[in-house]
Image (tube, coloured by chain):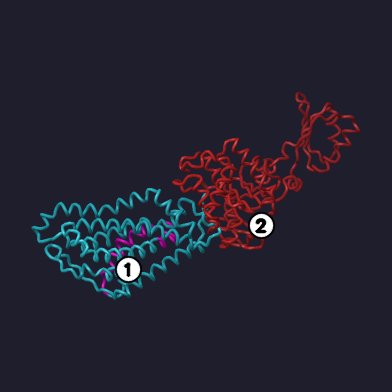
């Protein structure tokens, strides 16, 4: 299912929640990235019809989401807030919310049990939520979001408070949903988490859209921001000298002890195209090559700055 | 509604709200027990215990227990889902928002109504214990009449306070001011302003007290009412309740409840 925001804005009096966002989200996993207070939760609440846009529109399959309850049949939402009816057990919580989708008692129970198994909470399903750890509460929230098998999943900071094992399992589950053709929107302020789930991101800060698309495409768009490439090879000095002949190479730092050099270039694509020929021509043996800032942290830091 | 009612009922019954609602409901019962113990003293003042039921049901139930229970529970019908931030789970379901309001209101009315009914039944029984079963049975029409009015009053108050809870951020204080300020003062004002209270219509449906000629010290209580027509009062209260429910539903459709990060 396709999700579309068109000049979407939301403000509360003088305070801007999100400002003039336009994007389209297709099936697969999309990460919403931004620091705390960037407007991610507001955006998710707008997307799930909990808030009304002040300006612009947000649609799912060209239908507006505000006060459009039949659309919720296709939506699963895992809120960020640690909120529950604490007197219920995990299973009662998931089952009751699943039943609200129109399933029978038996079917909603079956679906709840299945969802609880998917998030690995079957051992704790009959305990009261009030007695759960933070990680368990996160997982049971996720179970209620997936139990009715929605086409679109909105997950607001789903990995918060999870232990490494739970984190890994949840990341795999989210990726699995994306591979199944579902539209999954995951918000997070922890970049490496999202990086593990998807390459497709939407960066926001102060309610404004900084970038949207594939992380590497976004990276290429940032032409003025130098890219660092670290190369481990056997002839550091020769390679350094040759690289400094290129106009787009801004600096080269080499580390003899480690046998590596770090190049800073403002034309990353051209640099990568030229490098193989240069290495081959000069008989340089490259052991490894990587770009330390070609990850979300670097892009995020640069764009938010 | 089928999925929502048992869900909200289960939550209510497991929460501590049931304990304090039952505790409040127990208060008039304890009062009648005390009166039972004090019956020899009351007899010296020419007061027969079974004749106190109208006064107890009027002052203690209608003017005290009912508004307190209705304020404390009514304002939380929607407000608690907002404050506990659980509203998010409900409004992202494929159910119209008015069903959430109706189901929660129905649960609150059922549970608080049961507490009031049980409490009134016990109070009535304790006050009429000396009459024996036959006498209790003869007098039970008063019990049913009083219970009917109290339940109608509960409906009107609950829906009103539910409406306050859906529209206002701090509804409890406003609710208490309404219940124990506005209602207790304005209902006795001359002119038409009394029609803007709920209790005015309840007085009209609660004729037992006025028809009972109070004797002894109770006869000294100087209260006079201008009563409205009984059926008109009944329909007014029903219409008021429907209007308050509709306004509560409207709040969920037009108002946005921003769930804060924790």
Q: Which residue is drawn at 17% across and 61% down?
A: B50
| Res B105 seen here | yes
Q: Where is residue A104 in the image (x, y as percent from the top left)?
A: 54, 55
Whether the magenta-drawn stretch holds residue B179 is answered as yes
Q: Colour of chain A?
A: red
Looking at the rendered structure, the secondary structure element under dot 2 is strand
Q: Which of A266 and A193 is in front in this view?
A: A193
Q: Position of residue A180 (x, y in %)?
A: 69, 49
From the viewer's perspective, is A235 left or right of A67?
right
Q: Main secondary structure of the magenta part?
A: helix
Where residue B140 is drawn, which disc sits there?
none
Location of residue B24 with respect to B208 vertically, above or below: above
Q: Are marks 1 and 2 in contact (CB under 8 Å)?
A: no
Chain designation of label 1: B
Chain (cyan): B
Looking at the rendered structure, the secondary structure element under dot 1 is loop
Q: Position of residue B260 (x, y in %)?
A: 51, 50
How many marks do you count on the picture? Answer: 2
Where residue A3 is drawn, which disc sits there?
2
Residue span colored magenta: B162-190
From the viewer's perspective, is B140 left or right of A112?
left
Residue identifier under label 1: B197
Q: Which of A69 and A212 is in front in this view?
A: A69
Q: Which residue is drawn at 55% across and 48% down?
A: A112
């Amino acid at each position: 299912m396709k999700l579309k925001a068109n000049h979407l804005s939301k403000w509360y009096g003088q305070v801007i929640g999100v400002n003039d966002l336009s994007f389209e989200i297709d099936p697969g996993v999309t990460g919403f990235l931004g620091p705390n207070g960037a407007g991610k939760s507001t955006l998710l609440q707008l997307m799930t019809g909990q808030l009304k846009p002040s300006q612009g529109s947000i649609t799912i399959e060209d239908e507006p989401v505000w006060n459009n309850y039949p659309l919720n049949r296709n939506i699963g939402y895992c809120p960020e807030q640690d909120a529950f009816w604490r007197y219920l057990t995990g299973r009662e919580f998931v089952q009751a919310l699943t039943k609200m989708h129109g399933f029978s008692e038996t079917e909603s129970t079956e679906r709840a049990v299945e969802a609880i198994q998917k998030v690995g909470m079957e051992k704790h399903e009959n305990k009261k939520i009030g007695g759960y750890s933070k990680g368990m509460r996160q997982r049971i929230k996720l179970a209620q979001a997936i139990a009715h098998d929605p086409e679109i999943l909105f997950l607001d900071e789903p990995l918060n408070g999870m232990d490494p094992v739970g984190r890994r399992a949840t990341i795999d589950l989210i990726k699995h949903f994306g591979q199944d053709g579902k539209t999954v929107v995951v918000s997070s302020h922890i970049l490496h988490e999202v990086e593990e789930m998807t390459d497709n991101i939407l960066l926001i800060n102060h309610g404004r859209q900084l970038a949207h698309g594939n992380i590497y495409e976004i990276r290429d768009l940032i032409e003025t921001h130098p890219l660092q490439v670290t190369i481990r090879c056997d002839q550091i000095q020769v390679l350094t000298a040759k690289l400094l002949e290129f106009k787009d190479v801004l600096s080269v730092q080499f580390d003899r002890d480690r046998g590596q050099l770090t190049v800073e270039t403002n034309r990353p694509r051209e640099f990568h195209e030229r490098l193989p020929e240069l290495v081959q021509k000069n008989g340089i043996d490259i052991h490894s090559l990587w770009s330390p800032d070609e990850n979300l942290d670097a892009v995020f830091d640069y764009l938010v700055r | 509604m089928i999925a929502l009612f048992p869900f909200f009922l289960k939550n209510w019954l497991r929460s501590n709200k049931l304990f304090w609602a039952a505790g409040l409901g127990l208060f008039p019962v304890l009062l009648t027990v005390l009166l039972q113990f004090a019956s020899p003293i009351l007899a010296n003042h020419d007061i027969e215990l079974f004749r106190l039921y109208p006064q107890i049901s009027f002052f203690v139930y209608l003017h005290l227990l009912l508004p307190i229970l209705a304020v404390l529970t009514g304002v939380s019908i929607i407000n608690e889902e907002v404050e506990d931030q659980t509203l998010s789970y409900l409004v992202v379901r494929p159910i119209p928002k008015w069903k959430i309001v109706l189901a929660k209101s129905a649960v609150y009315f059922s549970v608080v109504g049961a507490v009031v009914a049980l409490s009134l039944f016990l109070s009535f029984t304790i006050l009429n214990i000396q009459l024996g079963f036959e006498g209790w049975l003869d007098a039970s029409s008063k019990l049913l009449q009083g219970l009917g009015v109290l339940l109608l009053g509960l409906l009107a108050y609950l829906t009103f306070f539910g409406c306050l809870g859906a529209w206002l951020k701090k509804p409890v204080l406003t609710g208490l001011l309404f219940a124990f300020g506005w209602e207790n003062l304005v209902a006795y004002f001359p002119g038409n302003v009394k029609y803007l209270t709920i209790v005015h219509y309840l007085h009209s449906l609660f004729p037992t007290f006025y028809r009972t000629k109070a004797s002894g010290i109770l006869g000294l209580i100087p209260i006079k009412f201008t009563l409205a027509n009984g059926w008109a009062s009944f329909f007014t209260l029903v219409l008021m309740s429907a209007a308050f429910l509709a306004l509560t539903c409207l709040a969920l459709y037009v108002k946005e409840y921003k769930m804060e990060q924790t």
